[in-house]
Image (spheres, helix red, strand yellow):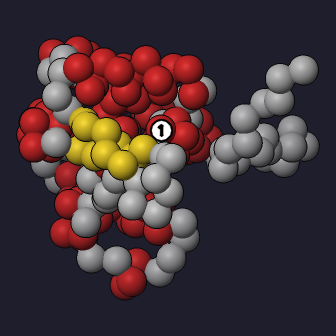
Amino acid sequence: MRKAPVTDQPSETPPEQPVDRRLILMARTIVVLYRAFETIAREHDITIPQYRFLLTLKRGPKRAGELAVSASIRKPTASALIADMEKRGLIVRQADETDGRSVRLRLTDKGLEKHKAFELALARYLPSLLEKGEAGRMLDAFTELAYIIDSGGAARDSLDLDELVSGE
């Protein structure tokens, strides 16, 4: 019997607890943004899971299993994505210095350029959704959310915005 993958996904809210309707609107917004991001990704010849791979690899070489976990996909799917990305020159395999039997995947210059081009396209798309008077407030709120997600809940002061964006 196959076990369900362990994830850091939040558990369901018990039905007896009232739900802030703004959370429903936030969820709907995320779904709409995701669909728009998929369209932009197709225009840049990349998939959202491949983007997540590139984002993860910006922080340094990783094993295939680590990439699968970071993209919330199964290992066979990750293997197919890795093969495609390697064939396209976005990533390369390198021997693991700590374990000679293992291989780590590393981002290439071409992969970094693909990542940057996609993120710039996303950044150029988003202002079309923001009203001028609210843009700063919404960007601040999303920046705060990005800090929380990226840091696993660490205080905002412990992370630098440039570090968060660059992934270094």
> Residue 23's spot in the image, x, y percent?
58, 43
Tell me the residue at 31%/34% (across/down): 51
| Most distant residue in the bottom direction | 157
Tell me the residue at 25%/66% (across/down): 168
Q: Is residue 24 above or below residue 63?
A: above
Question: Is residue 104 visible to the viewer in this orientation of the structure?
Answer: yes
Tell me the residue at 52%/36% (across/down): 68
Amino acid type, label 1: Ala
Residue closer to the observer: 140 or 111: 111
Judge from the rendering whether residue 114 lies leftward or rightward of residue 69; answer left or right. Answer: left
> Residue 118's spot in the image, x, y percent?
16, 34
The residue carrying mark 1 is 64
Judge from the rendering whether residue 128 lies leftward or rightward of residue 42; answer left or right. Answer: left
| Mark 1 secondary-structure assignment | helix
Crowding at dot 1, Cα within 10 Å, few <14 / some 14-19 / many 20+, comes out as: some
Residue closer to the observer: 87 or 72: 87
Question: Is residue 116 visible to the viewer in this orientation of the structure?
Answer: no
| Most distant residue in the front direction | 100
Residue closer to the observer: 66 or 168: 66
Where does the N terminus fall, quadrant-wise? top right
